[in-house]
Structures are given as C-alpha cells and as structure tokens.
Image (cartoon, rainbow, N blue to C red):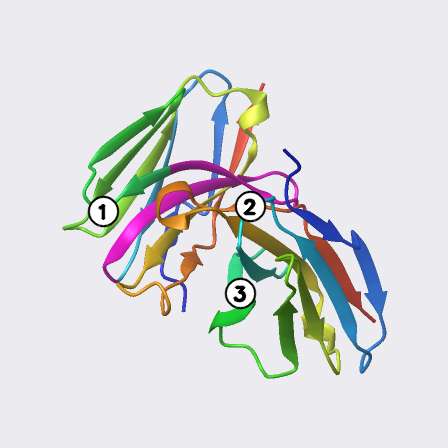
Amino acid sequence: EAGVTQSPTHLIKTRGQQATLRCSPISGHTSVYWYQQALGLGLQFLLWYDEGEERNRGNFPPRFSGRQFPNYSSELNVNALELEDSALYLCASSRDRFNYGYTFGSGTRLTVV
Amino acid sequence: SQQGEEDPQALSIQEGENATMNCSYKTSINNLQWYRQNSGRGLVHLILIRSNEREKHSGRLRVTLDTSKKSSSLLITASRAADTASYFCATDQGIYSSASKIIFGSGTRLSIRP
C-alpha cells in the first residue's frame, strides 16, 4: 500500500507570504495529524483532523490553519510567514493510533527568507 | 511543554554494543510509542506499549514501561551502523479521544561507531 505522501518536498517563501502544504494519508485512514519540527528539535503538535473535522489543535497562532477534504487528504496553510516558521512539517495518519501509532510522511521542508 | 523527555540527549557507542535510551513523562497515558528518524526525514514507528503492559519485544528492540515512575526505556541490542538515527518517545495522553493527542519528546541522537 502507498504510504503517507506529502508535497511539496521543499518550499521556499518570503516573510509575509502564505504557504500551503499538502498531505495524503494511507488509504483507509481517516485521521491526519500535522506536526512542526524546527531544526534539531522535537515535534510540536499542530493539528488533528478526523472525518473532515478539526479535533484538536496545538499551541500555535491562528495563522496556522488547515482542512481535511472528503477523500481524507489534508492541507496545512500558514499565513503571514515569519522566519521562525522555517521547519520540517510532518504529516501522519493512523488507522487506530491507540493500538498502532502513526505512519509519517517524509515531510515538507519550509524555508522562510 | 513536552510530555516526554528523553535521556541522554546524545549517545555514541561501538557497533555491536547495546544502546539504552530512557523517556520520562508527566501525566497518565493510554500508551507510549518509540519512533526513529533518519537525517531529518519522516519518523518510523518502532513499537507501541500500552499502559497496562510492562515489557514488549520486537526483533532487537526491547521496551519497558513503568507507569508508577512514569518512565520507559528502549534497548537496542547488538547495534549496527544502520541504527544511527534520532529516537523519540511519544505519549498518547488523555482519556477522551477528542481531547487527546500524541506528544513527542525532544529525542536521543544515537551514533554507532564502526
């Protein structure tokens, strides 16, 4: 089966612009999770979508938003980009995270200049 | 704040030796998971241990969980060069799925010397 796919692999934006990151979960997985990993640091929880609804949100400003489409793919939007938004953004999906954990995509490296 | 904290932050051992990494957390959990990350790429799920389990094995990996001490350890036996990576523990907290999320620690960087 195909894994979690993320696009683009790399993204370079200018401060103040908007970035859109995309994620397709494994077929049959209805939940999508977004994490931010700044260079050399751990993962910070951003957003959790399930069945098209936002279920939980981490401690990030409102300019971080997203949505989940009927086919369960997801989009993360970051508005008014700041230099500190530069990070690896990871998407994960799960069929049952209480028993199987997450499957991660390879991430999108966002660089804000 | 991070739920899980790994110890040590960095570990360098000789190939063939065993590597032990520890994780401490603060609140009650549903389960604890370990992941591996190679060179800033996506994370790979290694093993999940439920809160009512004390030990779990998978190949060369052994995970223990002590809920009374709120700690876990990951043991990699007979290490190989390919084990060089960052290892993260992650705790799935909360009782109600609508409020819970998986929280990751800051990771242990493991280097295997040939």
Amino acid beneath label 2: Gly
**SS type, badge 1:** loop
- Report the mark closest to the observer, 3 or 1: 3
B32 in relation to B92, above or below: above
Q: Nearer the viewer, mark 2 or mark 3?
A: 2
Please report, as a chain letter, where disc 1 is located: B
Name the amino acid type tagged 1.
Ser
Image height of A73 relative to A18, above or below: above
Return the chain for callout 3: A
Pointer 2 with pointer 3, Cβ within 8 A: no
Task: Give the Cα separation between the discs numbered 3 and 1.
Answer: 25 Å
Q: Are marks 2 and 1 on the same chain?
A: no
The residue that disc 2 covers is A28
Q: Quadrant of residue A91?
A: bottom right
Taking the image as shown, residue A38 lies to the left or right of residue B10, namely: right
Q: Nearer the viewer, residue A25 or A45?
A: A25
| Real-space CA distance between mark 2 and mark 1, rounded to the nearest whole angstrom | 26 Å
Q: Quadrant of the N terminus of chain A?
A: top right
Q: Tell me, yes or no, whether the two marked residues, 2 and 1, touch with CB atoms within 8 Å.
A: no
Residue identified by numbered label 1: B51
Instruction: Give me the C-alpha separation between circle 2 and circle 3.
Output: 14 Å
Assign the magenta stretch its main secondary structure.
strand
- Mark 3 sits on what residue? A49
* Residue B33, position as x, y percentages in the image: 38, 44
10 Å neighbourhood of mark 3: few (<14), some, or many (≥20)? many
- Label 1 crowd bin: few (<14), some (14–19), many (20+), radius 10 Å: some
The disc, 2 or 3, on the residue closer to the chain's N-terminal end is: 2
Residue at the far front: name it: A70
Estimate the x, y position of residue A22 in percent, counting from the top left: 72, 59
Picture coordinates of residue A65, whole percent (x, y): 63, 76
Can you say which quadrant of the picture contains the C terminus of chain A? bottom right
